[in-house]
Amino acid sequence: MTRYVIQRLILMVGTLIGVLTVTFVLTHILPGSPVEVMLGHRPTPDQIAAAKHELSLDLPLWRQYLRFLGEIGRGQFGKSFLTNQPVLQDISQRLMATVELTTLAMICIILIGVPIGVLSAVKANSPIDHFVRSLSVAGVALPAFMMGMLLQMVFYGWLGWLPLQGRMTSTVLLDHQFPTVTGLYLVDSLLAHDWVAFRDAAAHIVLPLATLTLANLPLVARTTRNLMVEALSEDYVRTAFAYSLPRRDVYFRYALKATLIPLLTVIGLTYGYLLGGAVVAEYVFDWPGIGGYVVRAITQSDYPAAVGVTLFLAAAYLTINLIVDLLYFAVDPRLRRA
Amino acid sequence: MTTETINALLTPERRITFLVRALHFARMNVLFVLGLTLFLLIVLAAIFAPLIAPYDPVAINFADKLSPPTWQHLMGANELGQDVFSQVLFGARTSLMVGVVVISLAIAIGVPIGLLSGYFGGRLDTALMRVSDVFLAFPPLLLPIAITAALGTGLFNAMAALAVSWFPWYSRIVRGAVMRVKSELYISAARAMGVSNVRIMLRHALPNSLTPIIVQGSMDFGYAILAAASLSFIGIGAQPPTPEWGLMAALSRDRFLDNWWTVAFPGLAIFVTVLAVNLVGDGVRDTLDPKHQSSH
């Protein structure tokens, strides 16, 4: 197992260098120059040359590449053109907002999606099953941004129950300054026993959370269902029923266990979709996380920020996939011996 | 309608068997038929958009600015007084084209790589697969966003970006299929007869991977439409005045709470189209891929 982990880590470093290379190609070789963005309208040739020198864009490409690798390797992501802050600082300020949103979404997806899938499989080909399957086919056909706007229209525009966007009402945030412990508003406000702040934060997260959950729920529910249908047709499940073990035990302790490995794979994939979906959802709901940040960075040609967040998200995605693969060992004892 | 009635209505035997089979297929695959019907309607709407559309989709008419749905404007009008219904119709052209172009491009890039990788194996395989892995290491949608930004915003760049970030799936499928058939006797026979590598790959290995490619392609078609709409929505895909559903939603974003029709109808169009495409994709998969029956 240790060997496998080391192999995977080496592979991951290789992939990360590949990711760096792709990012380098995208920012340094393709048209569109950061210099134009930095200098604005009608710079003089001297200004352009000076700026290029400053960004070492006048070096040969291979030297630029090595420099780029070196800087990233030393954790120097540069300063954002837009915020004029170090990119890493920008990321760390926004990271927890995204973590809060995506982690909660992941929890909701698992807690709702898996039971629905099991129910659908247990009642295979019943009206419930057909209903769940129709919903999951329909659910993936609605783009996340549409889902988000739809929710805004209903719950803010028509019903007025929930706030339109943002992470907290600014006045509440000013009046209730709870200490930052984790950076997760929901947790921090709870720790400070600040119920007003907690309620405000909770009200703000509902719609983006629902958007991300609904957009990714179908995949998990559908996969669980198909895996469970297969598991339920196994001999040992029939035997368990023959022994008249409690149905709930058979479903959740025996059958569901057999589906865990492929299910984990899908959950890992879903985390990737959540990170991608967060980009759109944060944009729609003006959520101050790194997803909305990267969209703004990219659309406004803020190269250092775009590179930094892209690399960060790719690394996060790879790490999550590695963790998921390592969880296989926890789930399947046979793998541990091999 | 029973078999007997059909028999009574139509005497030539072959036609009956065909009809019976078609009816049986339709009954077994209600969703597929529904999806296919919807899809064909959308294709027709896209083809005949200039004939059906009551207005020029880009014609600006401030007199009708933000008109709610009426008989003049079935789906209302947007901030510039453009007819939403006409825009939605022309948007169908954009979205269908996006689906076709993105999937074809992804296949055009992915298939040769998969063929080479699976057929020659060894170091070439390792190298090509590692490179493909890099493209899969980005969270979905992030790589297309980055590539589009680097190439410059626009629908064509967005399509290219989506294809570039999507091709590894096709490489993997083809590679797997080729590796399975590589050790078959007929390939060895062809090689013994001195058939060239290129010919073996194209004539013998490729046809064996066609089914999974078609299945994957039909499943991905809807994804391509969704992703392109998302890119347009965040402002780096289609640019005005191109009629594109994601862009329509984005342009109405400031005032959509009071003017639901400017967002709801393009949204409905995306939903119905992707739903139809996915239903067809599921049907294609169930028919072509016996391992993957969705109904047990």
Image (cartoon, grey):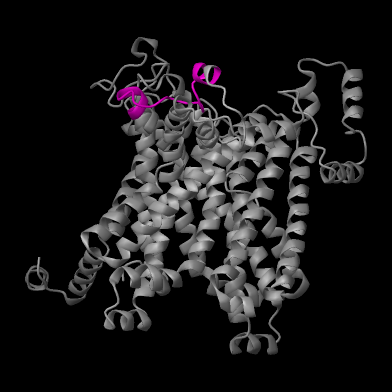
Q: Which residues are magenta?
A: A154-174
Image position, residue B142 (x, y; %) = 61, 43
Closest to the observer: B120 or A188?
A188
Q: Which quadrant of the structure image shows residue A120?
A: bottom left
Work out whether A300 lies above or below B226. Answer: above
Front-most of B195 and A190?
A190
Residue at the front extreme of this rendering: A193
| In the image, residue B248 above or below residue A59 | above
Residue located 31% across and 71% down the image: B296
Count of picture labels? 0
Q: Is residue A20 magenta?
A: no
Q: Residue at x 58, y 29 (%)?
A: A288
Say if residue B85 shows up in the picture: no
Q: Quadrant of the N terminus of chain B?
A: bottom left
Q: Position of residue A91 (x, y in %)?
A: 68, 35
Q: Position of residue B173 (x, y in %)?
A: 57, 67
Visible in this render: residue A111?
Answer: yes
Quarter location, residue A257: bottom left
- Left or right, A71 with respect to B196, comes to right
Of the pair B36 and A28, the residue shown nearer to us: A28
Q: Which residue shows up at 71% across the image and 85% down it?
A: B194
Q: Is A193 or B254 nearer to us in this picture?
A: A193
Q: Is A120 located above or below residue B243 in the figure?
A: below
> Horizontal and vertical percent for residue B234?
54, 32
Left or right: residue A277 compared with residue A117 = right
Check residue A164 for magenta coloring.
Answer: yes
The residue lying furthest to the top in this view is B63
Side of A109 relative to A76 (left or right): left
Residue found at x 71% / y 65%: A8
Q: Quadrant of residue B203?
A: bottom right
